[in-house]
Amino acid sequence: MEKVKSNKIIGLAKSEVIGFTPMYKKLEQKVILGGLSNATLLNYGRCIAKISLHFHVPFVALDEEQINGYLLFLLTILSLQSLTSNISIYQNYEG
């Protein structure tokens, strides 16, 4: 698997959220071992970076209530139509 191109939001999370980098490395490992594409890693990484930046902690440190509150915020305040894919990512990620 070819190394995923760096993404600005992922890079920002790596530099601003303590503990994000090791969590992202675990995600990268799971994606590679699962035979998933670079695009999948980039998509999952962006979503996890956004929520980590929002709370200023790695995604794996969040509880279900925080995640659901964030998703509700996205749905009601920002009216994101791609929320369904974000929910799937958060529900399926196991750090």
Image: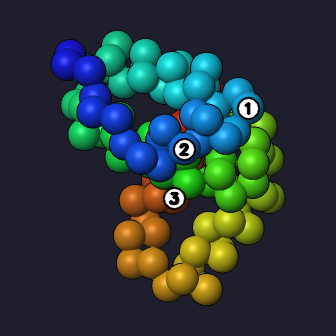
Q: Earlier in the sequence, mark 2 or mark 3?
A: 2
| Label 2, label 1: how far apart the Cα atoms are | 11 Å
Residue on which disc 1 sits? 18
Which quadrant would residue 2 be assigned to in this image?
Answer: top left
Q: Residue at x 61, y 86 (%)?
A: 77
Residue receiving disc 2: 12
> How many residues crowd mark 3 within 10 Å: few (<14), some (14–19), many (20+)?
some
Name the colour scheme: rainbow
Q: Where does the image place residue 18, in percent across and percent down from the top left?
A: 73, 32
Q: Residue at x 40, y 59 (%)?
A: 85
Q: Amino acid at mark 1?
A: Ile
Q: Position of residue 64 (x, y in %)?
A: 75, 52
Residue 22 picture location, percent across and down: 61, 20
In the picture, measured across the screen, residue 61 lies left or right of residue 21, that is: right
- Using the image, tell me which numbered label, if any, was put on residue 87: 3
Query: Disc 2 to disc 3, how far (Cα)?
Result: 22 Å
Report crowding for label 1: few under 14, some 14 to 19, many 20 or more residues within 10 A (C-alpha): some
Q: Amino acid at mark 2?
A: Leu
Above/below status of 62 relative to 51:
above
Q: Quadrant of the C terminus?
A: top right
* Mark 1 or mark 3, earlier in chain: 1
Q: What distance separates the C-alpha of mark 1 from that of mark 3?
A: 24 Å
Residue 28's disc is none
Give amino acid for label 3: Ile
